[in-house]
Image (cartoon, rainbow, N blue to C red):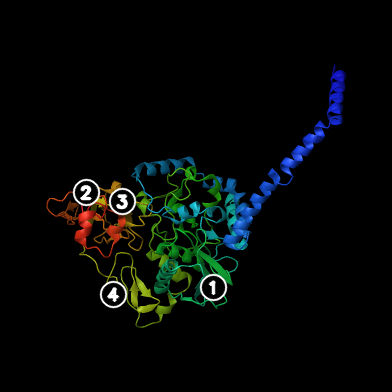
């Protein structure tokens, strides 16, 4: 039976061949996959188009090769991020305590660097969404994952110091120049961001297109930068959606030598990475550094660091990926402000603090402040502390309880980037305080660790209405409540916006208070 079947198959095959069936089929397959206009050519063209796009944006295709190399480690990275049952149970308990904040999106391009770069389709080629790695730095990241997976870690080195250190420092100051495509808005934003680092450190940041080592500031897809001084010309992009001072400050922080705060080697003492919510293509982006590449000069983790992403960064489902151990800090993650500890870290990294040590006129700063290396007679103070010596404070012997009575505003976004209130009730007064900007934060009460509670209210978009009650507590007995005064509308006016009301009316510098109150009483925070 087998012989007959084999004979029939052989005969059938011979007929097909003599009839040209397989020959025609082969031609069709060849034409479909290998011929001009075929799938093979189209796939090749897509690949070449992708490479050309990468070359246009980043100047070379190296970033593509680096990304592909790190992506091969995603299984190892995922395993490193997976939590043991006990830690996962603790995470679930913390998540259950979180208030469900309904965030909004203010700008179409995105409100955070991670959002902007995802929409610009450049995050897939970058490390942690906005970092352009050199091949040497990529090798460091690869080694970190492999070492942590094997449990064999290298000996400690200094913070942000790779094998090229100290060549990565801008020892003679940072030089930059603007590309021809940088408009006035981009130039203004970058200069303001650069000035934040320049005024608070000893690092001289100046415009000089003739310098050997320099940063080209230009408009490309996304917001991104290299880490540290690369040598020669290096790029820093502030594309569409990136024209915010906080974004420029963040990206320049990378160029000065900072990686992201949530990648610190000691991050597990402060935050938990919830691997279940991470996009599958980003596992390798959430691994931490090791003590071989990151020390931090004994400066603690700051949830309000400008180098820390918001809690939902890298999430595939809109749920939290980065969860602070102190969950009241959840909305502080993704801060748009340069933190006191950010500045202290940079000054320590560049040895700026040595400048004032021998100056007899150096200010005697209080409350953890220190002399500004740009002017030793002035102090750099923790957030919320003022006065020439950071010594403005309330009477001793009491604790203060603060309660948020009301928050009005339409711009609750991760990191409270556009408006909010910061309550410094935490024990470490050098760190950023707790920030709040959502309606869901109303009725929250915090008890301070001392008699000092700096309160900072800020707004970049419109007038907001934040009402706070506070009272002092002595020997366990509450003192009298004090409430911030409520704004009032004219008699008979309802708390309703007119059809012509827009955000621009609230932001207007031309319209007076009465006009804003008449057209946009609710949006502008008058009621």
Q: Is residue 481 shown left or right of residue 6?
A: left
- Which of the two discs, 3 and 2, sits closer to the camera? 2
Residue 18 rendering spot, x and y as whole percentages: 87, 30
Q: Is residue 388 shown left or right of residue 108?
A: left
Residue 47 rendering spot, x and y as whole percentages: 65, 51
- Counting residues from the N terminus, which is met first, the one under dot 2 or under dot 1? 1
Residue 225 rendering spot, x and y as whole percentages: 52, 63
* Spatial separation of the CA atoms under disc 3 and disc 2: 14 Å
- Which of the two discs, 4 and 3, sits closer to the camera? 3
Mark 4 is surrounded, within 10 Å at the Cα level, by few (under 14), some (14 to 19) or many (20 or more) other residues, namely some
Q: Which residue is mark 4?
A: 388
Question: Residue 214, labelled with which disc?
Answer: 1
Front residue of this view, candidates 350 and 395: 350
Q: Which residue is mark 3?
A: 410
Residue 216 rendering spot, x and y as whole percentages: 53, 69
Front residue of this view, candidates 245 and 380: 245
Q: Secondary structure at mark 4?
A: loop
Mark 1 is surrounded, within 10 Å at the Cα level, by few (under 14), some (14 to 19) or many (20 or more) other residues, namely many
- Counting residues from the N terminus, which is met first, the one under dot 2 or under dot 4? 4
Question: Residue 496, labelled with which disc?
Answer: 2
């Amino acid at each position: 039976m087998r012989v007959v079947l084999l004979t029939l198959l052989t005969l059938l095959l011979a007929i097909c061949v003599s009839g040209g069936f397989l020959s025609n089929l082969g031609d069709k397959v060849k034409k479909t996959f290998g011929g001009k206009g075929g799938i093979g050519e189209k796939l090749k063209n897509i690949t070449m188009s992708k490479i050309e796009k990468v070359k246009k944006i980043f100047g070379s295709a190296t970033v593509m090769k680096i990304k592909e190399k790190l992506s091969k480690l995603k299984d190892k990275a995922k395993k490193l991020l997976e939590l043991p049952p006990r830690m996962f149970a603790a995470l679930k308990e913390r998540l259950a305590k979180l208030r469900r904040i309904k965030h909004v999106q203010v700008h179409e391009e995105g409100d955070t660097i991670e959002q902007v770069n995802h929409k610009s389709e450049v995050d897939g080629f970058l490390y942690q969404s906005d970092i352009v790695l050199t091949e040497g730095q990529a090798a460091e990241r690869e080694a970190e994952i492999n070492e942590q997976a094997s449990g064999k870690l290298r000996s400690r080195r200094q913070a942000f110091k790779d094998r090229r250190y100290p060549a990565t420092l801008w020892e003679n100051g940072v030089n930059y120049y603007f590309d021809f495509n940088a408009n006035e808005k981009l130039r203004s934003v970058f200069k303001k961001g650069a000035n934040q680092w320049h005024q608070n450190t000893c690092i001289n940041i100046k415009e000089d297109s003739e310098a050997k080592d320099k940063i080209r500031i230009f408009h490309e897809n996304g917001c991104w930068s290299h880490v540290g001084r690369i040598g020669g010309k290096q790029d820093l992009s502030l594309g569409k959606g990136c024209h915010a001072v906080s974004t420029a400050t963040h990206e320049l922080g990378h160029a000065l030598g900072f990686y992201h705060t949530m990648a610190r080697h000691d991050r597990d003492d402060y935050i938990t990475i919830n691997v279940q919510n991470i996009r599958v293509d980003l596992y390798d982006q959430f691994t931490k550094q090791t003590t071989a590449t990151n020390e931090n000069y004994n400066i603690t983790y700051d949830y309000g660091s400008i180098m820390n992403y918001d809690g939902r960064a890298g999430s595939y489902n809109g749920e939290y990926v980065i969860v602070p151990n102190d969950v009241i800090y959840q909305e502080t993650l993704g801060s748009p402000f340069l933190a006191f500890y950010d500045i202290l870290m940079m000054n320590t990294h560049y040895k700026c603090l040595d400048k004032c040590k021998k100056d007899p006129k150096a200010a005697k700063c209080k409350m953890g402040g220190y002399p500004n290396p740009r002017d030793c007679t002035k102090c750099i103070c923790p957030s919320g502390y003022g006065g020439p010596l950071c010594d403005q404070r309330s009477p001793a012997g009491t604790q203060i309880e603060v309660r948020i009575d009301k928050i009005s505003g339409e711009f609750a976004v991760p990191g409270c980037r556009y408006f909010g209130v910061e309550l410094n009730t935490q024990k470490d007064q050098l760190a950023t305080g707790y920030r709040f900007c959502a309606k869901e934060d109303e009725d929250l009460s915090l008890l301070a660790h001392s008699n000092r509670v700096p309160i900072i209210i800020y707004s970049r978009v419109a007038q907001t209405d934040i009402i706070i009650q506070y009272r002092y507590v002595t020997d366990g007995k509450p003192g009298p409540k004090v409430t911030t005064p409520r704004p009032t509308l004219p008699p008979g006016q309802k708390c309703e916006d007119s059809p012509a009301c827009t955000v621009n009316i609230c932001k207007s510098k031309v319209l007076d208070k009465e006009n804003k109150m008449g057209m946009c009483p609710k949006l502008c925070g008058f009621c």
